[in-house]
Amino acid sequence: MSTTRVLVTGGAGFLGSHLCDALLAEGHSVIAVDNLLTGQSRNVAHLRNEPRFEFRQLDICEPFDCGRVDYVFHFASPASPVDYSLHGIATLKVGSLGTFNALELAKKYSARYFLASTSECYGDPSEHPQKETYWGNVNPIGPRSVYDESKRFAEAATVAYRRYHNLDTRIVRIFNTYGPRMQLNDGRVVPNFMKQALLGEDLTVYGNGSQTRSFCYVSDEVDGFLRLAASNEPGPVNIGNPAEFTILECAQKVLAVTGSKSNIRYEPLPQDDPKQRCPDITKARRLLGWDPRINLETGLRMSLEYFRKALQGNS
Ligand code: NAD
Ligand code: UDP
């Protein structure tokens, strides 16, 4: 990517803030916008004195204009099942109104546009592993629908702006990503297990723990974003680590990495919880030369200090 002025919506979130760091490291100027619904200003506090970085607190569901930009990375949206259940309407709004506003801004400045979509577009998949060509199995009225359908809508809107307005767009489908700056209380499995293990509390495995996920460390994931952003591939492209683990195996890894003696406690499986999820990354490998490098155990070790400090309240 040539040096540009880049907008990141959701820039104070977990992935958005890591993306800001990576874009700045590539030499770009970055403006991050965020309403801090599920993000934290401390995620970008280290950039306070960076002259190429600007943060604006605003809600992208209202039309906004931050001046000319060359690239729009649209990452704003609650992302964890706990967060999007709590903020269901806000999730639908940011996926629809927020997406339109971000697309309109890109159109106004003839900027390129990059949508953070999700493996949730595949729902509880009947195809495994999931290829980009799979249309998914989503319950449109279930508890996850506020998120799944808003992302499917955001994909449709992105493709429509490409089709009708010639906007230069990219769509990434992100699979479960973890690492430093995840909120301790967002209910996702890695922060939950890390917190519970470090506090010596029971690890709460939902269902019998046989459901699977594929966990990608954040630096690998962001590397995939940058490669896709710099390519001419509109996507959607899956970016995720294809190493698949049951949730019980994930709990055991966390116990091993933390050295915790915590027990496992089984709790009811949430409604519509996908039984299996694993990306087919043939497309990313072929078109972007991308492959994740950090396995789950290493990534959990690399995250340990962050979770320890976050628990002490000084992350
Ligand atoms: P996050 O909650 O940490 O970040 C999302 C950010 O968007 C937050 O800072 C939040 O305050 C902001 N936001 C929400 N509504 C907004 C609004 N109306 N206006 C301005 N800002 C708003 O979540 P994350 O894990 O960093 O996810 C970032 C993006 O990546 C999301 O779009 C999510 O759907 C996608 N994604 C993440 C994962 C993952 O594993 N982390 C997986 C698939 C997709
Ligand atoms: N999960 C769990 N215990 C927890 C949190 C999550 O067993 O404390 C399970 C959850 O039921 C799901 C998987 O871990 O099967 C991943 O959940 P997460 O909320 O991290 O993300 P999802 O992939 O479901 O969006």
Image: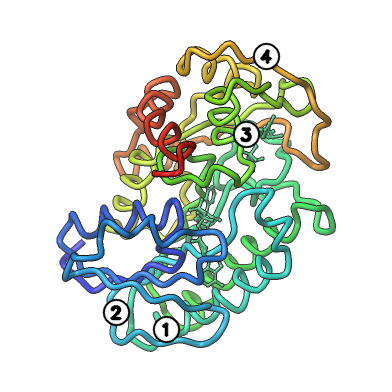
- Say whether marks 1 and 3 touch (CB < 8 Å): no
Mark sitting earlier along the chain (1/4): 1
Residue 110: % across, % down: 33, 83
Circle 1: element type: helix
Q: Is residue 73 above or below residue 268?
A: below
- Say whether marks 3 and 2 touch (CB < 8 Å): no
- How far apart are the two marked residues, 1 and 3, measured between alpha carbons? 34 Å
Q: Which of the two marks, 4 or 3, is nearer to us in this view? A: 4
**Label at residue 277:** 3
Q: Amino acid at mark 4?
A: Asn
- How far apart are the two marked residues, 4 and 3, measured between alpha carbons? 25 Å
- How far apart are the two marked residues, 2 and 4, measured between alpha carbons? 50 Å
Circle 3: element type: loop
Residue 302: % across, % down: 35, 28
- The crowd level at tag 1 (other Cα within 10 Å; few <14, some 14-19, many 20+) is many
Q: Amino acid at mark 3?
A: Arg
Q: Amino acid at mark 2?
A: Val
- Say whether marks 2 and 1 touch (CB < 8 Å): yes
Mark sitting earlier along the chain (4/3): 4
**Label at residue 105:** 1
Mark sitting earlier along the chain (1/3): 1
Residue visible at 43% across and 20% down in the picture? 297
Circle 4: element type: loop
Q: Which residue is mark 4?
A: 263
Q: Which residue is mark 2?
A: 69
- How far apart are the two marked residues, 1 and 4, measured between alpha carbons? 50 Å
Q: Amino acid at mark 1?
A: Leu
Mark sitting earlier along the chain (2/4): 2
Residue visible at 27% across and 69% down in the picture? 30
Q: Which of the two marks, 3 or 2, is nearer to us in this view? A: 2
| In this picture, residue 95 sits left or right of residue 301 | right
Q: Is residue 29 above or below residue 17?
A: below
